[in-house]
Amino acid sequence: MEILPLLNSLLLARGPGGQEDEVRVVARQALAACCEEVHDDGAGNVIGVIRSAVPAGPAAAIRVMAHLDEIAMIVKKVRPDGNLEVLALGGAQPISFGVCPVDIMADQQVLPGVLSYGSMHNSGQSGSGRDVLSGAVQWKDVYVVTRMTPQALEQAGVRPGTRVVLSQHWRQPFQVEDCIAAHFLDDRAPLAAVIHCAHLLQQRRSELRQDVWFVLTTHEEESNAGAMYAASRLPGDTTIAVEVGPVLEEYGTRLSADPIINTGDQKGYYSRSVVQALMAATRRAGYTPQPALLVDFASDASAVLSTGTDARAGCIAIPTDNTHGFEMVLREGISACAASLLEYVLQPDGPATPAQ
């Protein structure tokens, strides 16, 4: 399986939380090519499994999670002039998108719009004008221009709760030497890595000693609801989240192919044994792990662990610059993450210790 064509398809697919239909179709098709069973569960997660060639108890199963949804916007109010007031859906800030084209995901169609802060040629007399001129734009300053009447919007099914996403017009990946830059590499790059890992694992299934469940989750950016639903119903005591990892001096992380091994985040600390096993697996794959305590961060795995749904959890991440913006990863970073994850699921407890 080639990673870049899959990544391109995932990037073009729209997937705001609660409406991940387009990206779900792409991901399900790619996962179905290597998993023994693939289905959507009641929460909208895509679930695939590769079973061990030897019998193993259900508790030994490993759940590998990457999320389908992206940061987006949600309509708060339709104004009398037909413009839309919006709020963040997930961890978005207005600076994440800038002034740009958007797609309004109405009931039966996708409508065009433009995300706007108003004209820069203002005197700053209004509160929103002062925010724009100072560069401190807040969601209260933001609106979507539709050029439609409220009546026409209502007929199209645009109302409070309608999702608004960055337009496909601006979703194309951009090549920068050895890197790929694009909006929504969170979480499209981890999705591509997880699916690539599943393809690699199918080729080495004879070495597998426990079942591996690949769980592509919904609602990660807002509530981790999809992950918690799946973890409460699927076998296994261990969850591994595959994520993007911020490249920041404060975390000591660098933009390279070497995976970031998250040791803890705002929901708690990851299981020490899993962190050690992920670091060992990364070395076996030929890379140097980047351990990091990502304080301002969270994942499906830390959410599952913090609620007591799981006994053990870990997180491996692709080093990513400009997280929640126009993100950038090394092309090799995706395959490096997949290779390291493969080594982990094949030897989750590390290599066997030779007999003395």
Image (tube, rainbow, N blue to C red):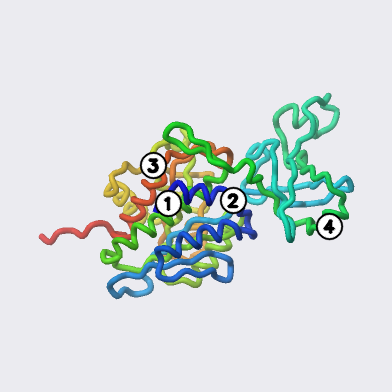
Residue under the point 56% across and 46% down: 184
Q: Determine whether the residue tagged by mark 1 lies in a helix, strand or loop.
A: helix
Q: Earlier in the sequence, mark 1 or mark 3?
A: 1
In-image side of 63 versus 227 (left or right): left
Q: Earlier in the sequence, mark 2 or mark 4?
A: 2
In-image side of 326 versus 150 (left or right): left
The residue lying toward the viewer, choosing from 255 and 249, is 255
Alpha-carbon span between mark 1 and mark 3: 10 Å
Q: Amino acid at mark 2?
A: Glu
**Mark 4 sits on what residue?**
154
The answer to whether the residues at label 1 and label 3 have Cβ atoms under 8 Å apart is no
Q: Amino acid at mark 1?
A: Ala
Q: Position of residue 207 (x, y in %)?
A: 26, 64
User: Residue most toward the left?
Assistant: 356
Q: Determine whether the residue tagged by mark 4 lies in a helix, strand or loop.
A: helix
In-image side of 11 versus 195 (left or right): right
Q: Earlier in the sequence, mark 3 or mark 2?
A: 2
Q: Determine whether the residue tagged by mark 3 lies in a helix, strand or loop.
A: helix
Q: Earlier in the sequence, mark 4 or mark 3?
A: 4
Q: Determine whether the residue tagged by mark 2 lies in a helix, strand or loop.
A: loop
Q: Position of residue 257 (x, y in %)?
A: 38, 40
Residue under the point 77% across and 52% down: 76
Alpha-carbon span between mark 3 and mark 2: 22 Å
**Mark 1 sits on what residue?**
193
Q: Which numbered marker is on residue 332?
A: 3
Alpha-carbon span between mark 4 and mark 3: 46 Å
**Mark 2 sits on what residue?**
70
In the depicted structure, whether residue 355 falls above or below residue 57: above
The answer to whether the residues at label 2 and label 4 have Cβ atoms under 8 Å apart is no
Q: Quadrant of residue 313?
A: bottom left
Q: Earlier in the sequence, mark 1 or mark 4?
A: 4
Q: Earlier in the sequence, mark 2 or mark 1?
A: 2
